[in-house]
Amino acid sequence: MLDRKALRHDAETIFAQLAARGYTGDLQTFVNLENKRKNLQAEVEQLQNTRNVHSKAIGQAKSKGELADDAMIAMKDVGEQLKQQEKALDIVQGELETLYLSMPNIPHVSVPEGSSEDENKVVRSWGKPTMLDFVPKDHVALGEALGGMDFDAATKISGARFSILQGPLAKLHRVLAQFMLDTHTGQHGYTELVVPYLVSRKSLFGTAQLPKMDEDIFHISGDWDLSLIPTGEVPLTNLYRDNILDTADLPIKLVAHTPCFRSEAGSYGKDTRGMIRQHQFEKVELVQFANPEVSYDALESLTHAAETILQLLELPYQVVSLCKGDMGFASAKTYDLEVWLPGQQMYREISSCSNFESFQARRMQIRHRSKQEKPTFLHTLNGSGLAIGRALVAVLENYQQADGSVRVPSVLQPYMDSDVITVV
RNA sequence: GGAGAGAUGGCUGAGCGGUCGAAAGCGGCGGUCUUGAAAACCGUUGAGGGUUCAUAGCCCUCCCUGGGUUCGAAUCCCAGUCUCUCCGCCA
């Protein structure tokens, strides 16, 4: 949610900034609604003031034992008027609220112009695309040949877009998560949490998954107002909802390994093969609560933390700054990390790191304060560090050998107790 | 599933329908004392909104949420949400 005061003061500029990222809302509609609100609110507050003043006078008269019948009769009328005007104000406030909730975040000045992913900018790359002296297989072919990846059985159990891992591949999956958690807690100063995977609608509103992404979320049925988390960001960021944190305690850095559930409603026919896009996947999520003054430094450090994992795994990748038109609704700036996949001969997203500035904090009422200063909204950030299923895909495809076996990245060897994965 | 208790400021916790935005304590901040610190003492300290150049005034709202009663509600009534305790069931 944007800052209402700022919007009112300079609606024209902000609407232009939003238009640059594809927002189509109408400035005049907003201005008209705000004027209506302003007038109604002034009337209501005037009536409330009248009521307060007279009620107080009645109270004082009564305590002296005087009669105040005339005043009481006159106030009855004020009460009726007030009720009507309050109702009218409520309606306008509701319309405004809906409008505010539908407005995306303002892109940071450093975000590239552009309307689609074609205009995203590569800001740096690490490593060279893996060159193999044989025709590389993709992870599906590798997995099935190795005998530890089964899509048909998963379809039998649950349907499309699920998978089953077995044996060494299941272990590799587990080990990747553990390696990531160990690195972020041990080297990057993140605190590890285990969090709920079912969350309330209020939490989904807080991080702005709702109302926009409703159809992408699995809401559980029955007498429960709960949904499966589409990302660990939701429980982690909502942890401090309605809190006022001490500025001295910032930044607060959290990490959690969670499953994620997405209906992928808008992506029929996209990435239907393999583990790239599933209804259920796991992710190690990084979240930071940052002082607004340094939140862009925090974005760099969070992105670097995620990159570290790829570097330690020796996986080639590039960092992409998403253009205005391709960023998520709540983000002010986003870097995607894209890992090289020899099986697809292209870079694919494996992490997305964003600074939401105060957009989420305002929805969740997360503030910070130092000493006697007024509480102000802090900045929230998050990023995947990394998506585990996709990391597994990247390891398989980049470490494959001509005979179909897969070498184990050296940092994972202590976890795996072996240096190669071969046919079972 | 059965029975009961509760929800008040950063926290703990009082609060006869009318100077209650709310006692007290803790914490925070400022000060006195001290070589320094602690202790003690004194003072100060809720949030949001409207109007405004203003973090100046003035005004409004907020005691879980939503309704209701009333001239007037933290206080009374109704509905809901959440939390806690005990019993049962259970990973």
Image (cartoon, grey):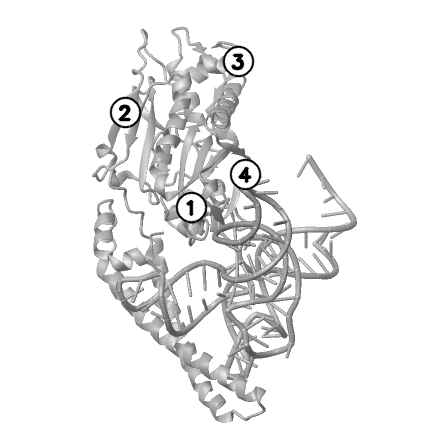
User: Are labels 4 and 2 assigned to the same chain?
Assistant: yes
Is A201 rendered above or below residue A400?
below
Residue named by callout 4: A195
- Parent chain of label 3: A
Amino acid type at circle 1 is Thr
The residue wearing badge 3 is: A414
Distance from the alpha carbon under mark 4 to that under mark 2: 34 Å
Distance Cα–Cα, label 1 vs label 3: 37 Å
Q: Which mark is residue A404?
A: none
Q: Secondary structure at mark 2?
A: strand
State if disc 1 and disc 2 touch (CB < 8 Å): no
Q: CA distance from mark 2 to mark 1?
A: 29 Å
Q: Chain of mark 1?
A: A
N-terminal of the pair, mark 1 or mark 3, is 1
Residue A122 placed where, x, y %? 25, 28
Question: Residue sitting at 39 percent across and 8 percent down?
Answer: A401
Report how far apart the C-alphas of labels 4 and 1 lie in the structure. 15 Å
Q: Earlier in the sequence, mark 4 or mark 2?
A: 2
Instruction: Return the disc, 4 or 1, that comes first in the chain's sequence.
Output: 4
User: Relative to A153, does residue B17 appear above or below in the rendering?
Assistant: below
| Number of numbered callouts drawn | 4
The percent position of residue A54, horizontal first and vertical second, equals 46, 84
Q: Earlier in the sequence, mark 3 or mark 4?
A: 4
Residue designated by label 2: A124
2 or 1: mark nearer the eye:
2
Which type of secondary structure does the marked residue at label 3 adopt? helix
Residue at label 1?
A: A207
Q: Amino acid at mark 4?
A: Val
Task: Report if residue A115 is visible in the image.
Answer: yes
Q: Mark 3 vs mark 2: tell me if same chain.
A: yes
